[in-house]
Amino acid sequence: MNTMRIGCEFSFDAGHFIPGHPGPCQQTHGHTSHLEVVVEGPVQDNGMVMDFQKVKDVVRREVLSALDHHLLNDVIENPTVEVCIEWIWARLQPHLPLASVKLWEGEWKWAKKTASP
């Protein structure tokens, strides 16, 4: 079986604060976040693992529609990048054969979750 990974990248803008955090992140602030979604599977007879458009449609419907230009605290109770990754994974996993999800909070900070082997 010819298994391969494909990925799509997205960005969204959102505000958040980290409740009880002892630093500046306890104040409401915003980020432009970058999201990478990687799916894995066999290359089908049509030569594709999955149509990129399907990946984009699912991510837009299940994740971006809820997060882009929103206050993350209204959607996710404690919106650290780690908790956001878990939330995103839970929203996408029923619809896509996920290999990994990586989320950058701004330019230099990120978390990544991968599928168990």
Image (cartoon, rainbow, N blue to C red):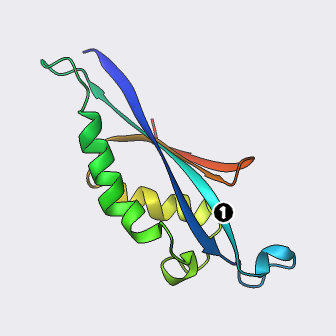
**Can you see residue 93?**
no
Q: Residue at x 51, y 83 (%)?
A: 74
- Asked if residue 48 lies left or right of residue 20, the reply is left
Tell which of 116 and 2 is nearer to you: 2
Q: Residue at x 32, y 20 (%)?
A: 3
Q: Residue at x 27, y 50 (%)?
A: 57
> Is residue 85 placed above or below 26 in the rendered structure?
above
Determine the image quadrant of residue 29.
bottom right
Residue 21 at what x, y percent from top left? 80, 79
**Can you see residue 72?**
yes
- Asked if residue 8 lies left or right of residue 49, the reply is right
> Is residue 36 placed above or below 33 in the rendered structure?
above
Tell which of 16 and 87 is nearer to you: 16
Quadrant (top left, top right, bottom left, bottom right) of the N terminus: top left
Q: Which residue is mark 1?
A: 31
> Is residue 110 placed above or below 27 in the rendered structure?
above
Residue 77 at what x, y percent from top left? 56, 81
Residue 47 at what x, y percent from top left? 20, 17
Q: Residue at x 62, y 58 (%)?
A: 32
Residue 64 at what x, y percent from top left? 41, 61
